[in-house]
Image (cartoon, coloured by chain):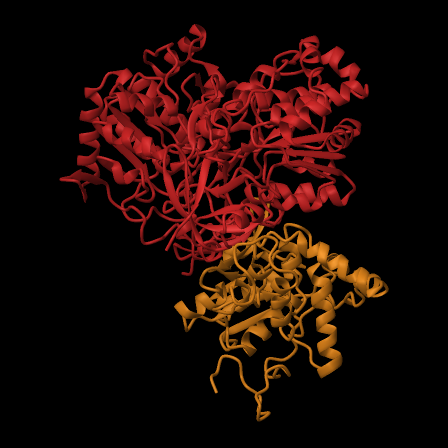
């Protein structure tokens, strides 16, 4: 399958459709995000389900594509995207964090095995070029198990989980959609600074709520947690709630406004624009 | 052409040795990306690791050499700076000059620094901050086991049945190691914590022993007394793998739970519970750190940990062992490289004629068999005028060493002080010459993690300003001193020389550690490294027990100074704060120093949470915010030592262990006063 991806990427180069390709690269047995400037570099282009492509760099709080766009506003960028990457781009675009105008996608479907390993609800992009769609993992077993327990048991389960927290901010740092300039998780007004574990459950729920209409379920938060808190269990539940309450799903359509962005006169606000 | 790279390297903070990528866009550092394939971190980092790129291009970075003129540091060219240093160094005899190497620098740089001291300056006066952290480990585990390093590997903790942590605040000092402690616990392991403070891991402990600071020997003897009394020792192990058991037995006999309760304050039933838990586990890992080592009885404490592990047969197998957690990113490596006054690289004694001859041949020079001075001794001799010049690389004794009023007096007495660092530290401010070095992000080399894993550090960006990597500075100095023995094309060539003269590193070269690090001893190019030590037999042959009597700390509380001060660190900062206090995300968490105090003491002294208090000892007085709570028990004050405005080490006691010369940073007597407005 990678041959097909490389071939399409080569065609994008040849037709002048793109000047660079952004994707994953294999280097010394490790896979990292990379910029490919020339056709002959594409031999190292790989696809992998495990590595993130669009992490937010700190302290700028912008991802590499945004940094490239700012430095090279005219650059035409080709991107090899999985389902999760596409949904991230849609959310970033919706929130004025990235311009999609100069981005050409090469959409790749993940296989069943990867979908299960990632617990991914939708292991393919809408813009699919290569690979075949397989079903995603819809049911969250961990959550189902928890929902069958008594409220008090659920409370103590989560109290225990959050009590392990060492306040690395890894869940936020690894999130491709945590780009806020001023992060409420850091602010003394919301949760006391300089303490571990940080206030339970405030510290974590600031993030969950802030991402309620944004999270696209990529799983990077949970993967970054050094103490194995099952963060996705909660964010998946919140995603479900948003769907039930507002019939809204993040990551589907860059033009669709989030139902949580309303003003008092019920004219939807646009994120990134002051009213 | 847009250049975007992810450069795999090793975190510059603690000894866990987490790998991560430095993200570099068109030559600029833009961020940190965890590595999911890294053996220790598995794609996770602590707050310091996540922010490890932030300080690199801080505006305060030293970018040009500086010379002191009329009390002020002014810029000077590299060439002139090195010429002046060379001329000055030539004025001093080997006994008048001393060198401090750095646990922050690479193995290659530490090797070169000790080679420079020994072969160019002709002195064995070379030491580094390991003196302040694990000098007692090197001595204590050396004499009991034959090797003074962490016995097992970080990942092995996960599969232990019992983990006994004594004097290590693992969550805050080695966050990614605490990950495996928690994973073990979630798999059903028992967790015993011995620490006066209610550290974060105590929340998950089956047993929390809150000993009076400085009574660890009694605590450990007590556990052994119980184990022998209940006959749950590992008789087979004792008989086959150890010696001198009778001596231990005779001593620990006296330490009944009742006696130990009187000394340590730990209820006898709790000690019995802990002793059983540890002894009855199939594989028990003992973890310790500064709470064990930083005492005048540091070696005794370490030996007692070794005694306990041997008594129960918990050495030489996976997920067991005695595991000193090394503090700095490369303090293990700096020791391995022989940045110590009595050994060459690989712990080869300077007093051994054969070893001396070997290094004389390798370096084409003459060497001395007289061991040099340790840090504390160097400073004492600087004060008396015997040491006249010092060359300090990447260390900040003005904040890290005990009794800093004395440190300052000593350093000011020097005729010539050269400090090589990335920032103008409190120590660099006192220097006659300051050389700008590069950070970890701007150079190639290796760091050795606490579990003896030698890993590649990779250059991500060009040096900031006119700074140079430490290895290059040392080579240029050596060349100007007239040596031909410091010509290396790259750090990789330095490692080749290290491997040639250092048996435990013999199998290591850059090609072999390109993908994944190797754990020493690595004895040949075919050897795959050593995940845990002392398999089948101890490094010294048989493990040796020593009977150790309890001795109290040197300075105990009295009427005038009624509190015990114990010092340490927080997860949000690192050591003297030169890097972390220049990192916004870390400073936001903890912007200034504080003293922890028990609420009952606070109530008695009419002190409320958050107010400023004076804390003073026989050596100094500081003003600091008080955090009132239940982390410390009554009678104890805890102060982290990161903060130059409220330096804990103004108060600490420089009294040191007679053998390891490690100062008693964990116990001294202080008084607390309310500030009257």
Seen at 63% across and 26% down, the residue is B263
Measured as percent of width and height from the top left, residue B339 is found at 42, 24
Residue B71 in the image, given as x and y percentages of width and height: 17, 40
Q: In which quadrant of the rendered image does the N terminus of chain B lie?
A: bottom left
| Viewer-closest of B16 and A108 | B16
Q: Quadrant of residue B352?
A: top left
Q: For the C terminus of chain B, which image quadrant?
A: bottom left
Question: How far across and down, in percent of the image, does residue B585 sit?
Answer: 47, 57
Toward the bottom, the furthest residue is: A265
Residue in the picture at 41% in, 50% down: B581
In-front residue for pair B186/A144: B186
Q: Residue furthest right?
A: A148
Asked if residue B334 can be seen in this view, the reply is no
What residue is shown at x 37% (from left), y 33% (from top)? B619
The residue shown at (39%, 34%) is B490
Extreme top residue here? B353
Q: Please provide percent x and percent y for residue B312.
A: 74, 22
- As drawn, the chain in orange is A
Say above or below: B38 vs A120.
Answer: above
Considering depth in this image, is A88 or B127 the residue closer to the camera?
Answer: B127
Q: As displayed, is residue B335 above or below residue B616? A: above
The colour one sees for chain B in the rendered image is: red
Is B486 located above or below residue B53 in the figure? Answer: above
In the image, is B182 to the left or to the right of B457?
right
Q: Quadrant of residue A266?
A: bottom right
């Amino acid at each position: 399958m990678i041959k097909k991806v490389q071939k399409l990427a080569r065609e994008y180069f040849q037709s002048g459709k793109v000047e660079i390709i952004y994707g994953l690269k294999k280097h010394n047995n490790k896979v990292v995000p990379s910029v490919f400037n020339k056709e002959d570099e594409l031999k190292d282009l790989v696809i992998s389900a495990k590595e993130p492509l669009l992490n937010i760099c700190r302290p700028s709080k912008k991802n590499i594509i945004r940094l490239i766009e700012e430095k090279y506003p005219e650059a035409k960028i080709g991107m090899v995207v999985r389902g999760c990457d596409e949904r991230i781009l849609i959310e970033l675009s919706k929130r004025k964090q990235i311009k999609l105008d100069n981005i050409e996608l090469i959409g790749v479907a993940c296989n069943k095995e990867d979908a299960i390993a990632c617990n991914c609800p939708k292991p393919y992009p809408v813009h699919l070029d290569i690979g075949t769609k397989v079903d995603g993992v819809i049911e969250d077993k961990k959550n189902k198990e928890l929902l069958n327990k008594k409220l008090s048991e659920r409370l103590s389960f989560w109290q225990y989980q959050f009590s392990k927290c060492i306040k690395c901010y890894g869940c936020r740092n690894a999130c491709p959609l945590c780009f806020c300039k001023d992060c409420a998780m850091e602010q003394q007004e919301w949760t006391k600074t300089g303490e571990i574990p940080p206030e339970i459950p405030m510290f974590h729920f600031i993030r969950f709520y802030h991402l309620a209409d944004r999270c696209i379920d990529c799983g990077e938060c949970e993967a970054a947690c050094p103490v194995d808190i099952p963060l996705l269990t909660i964010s998946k539940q919140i995603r479900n709630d948003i769907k039930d309450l507002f019939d809204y799903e993040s990551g589907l359509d860059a033009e669709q406004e989030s139902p949580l962005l309303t003003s008092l006169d019920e004219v939807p606000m646009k994120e990134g624009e002051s009213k | 052409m847009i250049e975007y790279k992810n450069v795999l390297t090793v975190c510059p903070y603690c000894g866990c040795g987490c790998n991560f990528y430095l993200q570099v866009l068109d030559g600029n550092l833009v961020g940190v990306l965890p590595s999911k394939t890294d053996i220790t971190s598995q794609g996770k980092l602590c707050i310091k690791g996540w922010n490890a790129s932030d300080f690199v291009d801080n505006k305060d970075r030293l970018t040009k050499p500086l010379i002191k003129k009329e009390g002020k540091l002014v810029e000077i060219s590299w060439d002139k700076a090195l010429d002046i240093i060379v001329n000055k160094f030539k004025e001093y005899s080997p006994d008048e000059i001393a060198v401090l190497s750095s646990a922050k620098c690479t193995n290659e740089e530490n090797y070169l620094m000790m080679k420079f001291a020994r072969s160019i300056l002709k002195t064995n006066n070379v030491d580094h901050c390991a003196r302040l952290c694990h000098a007692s480990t090197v001595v204590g585990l050396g004499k009991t086991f034959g090797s003074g390093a962490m016995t097992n590997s970080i990942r092995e903790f996960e599969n232990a049945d019992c983990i006994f942590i004594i004097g290590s605040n693992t969550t805050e000092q080695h966050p990614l190691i605490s990950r495996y402690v928690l994973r073990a616990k979630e798999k059903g392991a028992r967790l015993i914590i011995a620490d006066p403070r209610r550290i974060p891991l105590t929340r998950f402990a089956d047993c929390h022993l809150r000993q009076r600071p400085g009574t660890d020997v009694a605590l450990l003897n007590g556990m052994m007394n119980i184990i022998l009394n209940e006959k749950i020792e590992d008789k087979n192990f004792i008989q086959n793998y150890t010696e001198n058991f009778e001596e231990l037995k005779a001593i620990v006999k006296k330490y009944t739970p009742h006696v130990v309760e009187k000394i340590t304050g730990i209820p006898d039933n709790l000690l019995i519970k802990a002793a059983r838990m540890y002894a009855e586990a199939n594989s028990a890992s003992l973890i310790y750190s500064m709470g064990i080592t930083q005492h005048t009885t540091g070696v005794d404490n370490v030996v007692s940990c070794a005694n306990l592990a041997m008594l129960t047969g918990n050495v030489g197998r996976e997920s067991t062992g005695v595991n000193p957690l090394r503090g700095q990113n490369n303090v293990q490596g700096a020791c391995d490289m022989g940045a110590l006054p009595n050994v060459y690289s690989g712990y080869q004694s300077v007093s051994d004629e054969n070893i001396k001859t070997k290094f004389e041949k390798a370096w084409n020079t003459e060497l001395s068999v007289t061991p040099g001075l340790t840090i504390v001794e160097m400073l004492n001799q600087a004060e008396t005028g015997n040491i006249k010049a010092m060359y300090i690389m990447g260390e900040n004794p003005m904040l890290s060493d005990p009794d800093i009023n004395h440190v300052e007096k000593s350093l000011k007495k020097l005729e010539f002080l050269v400090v090589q660092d990335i920032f103008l530290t409190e120590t660099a401010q006192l220097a006659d010459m300051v050389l700008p070095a590069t950070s970890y992000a701007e150079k190639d080399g290796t760091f050795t993690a606490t579990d003896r894993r030698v890993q590649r550090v990779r250059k991500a960006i060009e040096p900031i300003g006119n700074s140079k990597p430490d290895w290059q500075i040392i080579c240029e100095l050596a060349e100007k001193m007239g040596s031909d023995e410091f010509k290396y094309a790259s750090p990789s060539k330095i490692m080749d020389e290290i491997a040639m003269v250092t048996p435990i590193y013999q199998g290591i070269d850059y090609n072999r550690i390109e993908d994944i690090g190797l754990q020493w001893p690595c004895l040949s190019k075919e050897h795959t490294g050593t995940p845990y030590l002392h398999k089948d037999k101890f490094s010294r042959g048989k493990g040796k027990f020593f009977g150790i009597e309890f001795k109290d700390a040197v300075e105990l509380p009295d009427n005038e100074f009624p509190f015990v001060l114990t010092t340490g660190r927080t997860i949000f900062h690192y050591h003297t704060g030169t890097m972390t206090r220049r990192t916004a995300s870390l400073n936001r968490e903890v912007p200034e120093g504080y003293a922890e105090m028990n609420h009952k003491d606070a109530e008695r002294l009419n002190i409320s949470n958050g107010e400023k208090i004076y804390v003073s000892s026989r050596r100094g007085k500081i003003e600091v915010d008080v955090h009132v709570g239940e982390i410390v028990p009554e009678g104890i004050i805890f102060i982290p030592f990161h903060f130059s405005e409220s330096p804990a080490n103004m108060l600490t006691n420089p009294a040191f262990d007679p053998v390891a010369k490690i100062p008693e940073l964990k116990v001294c007597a202080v008084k607390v006063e309310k500030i009257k407005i």
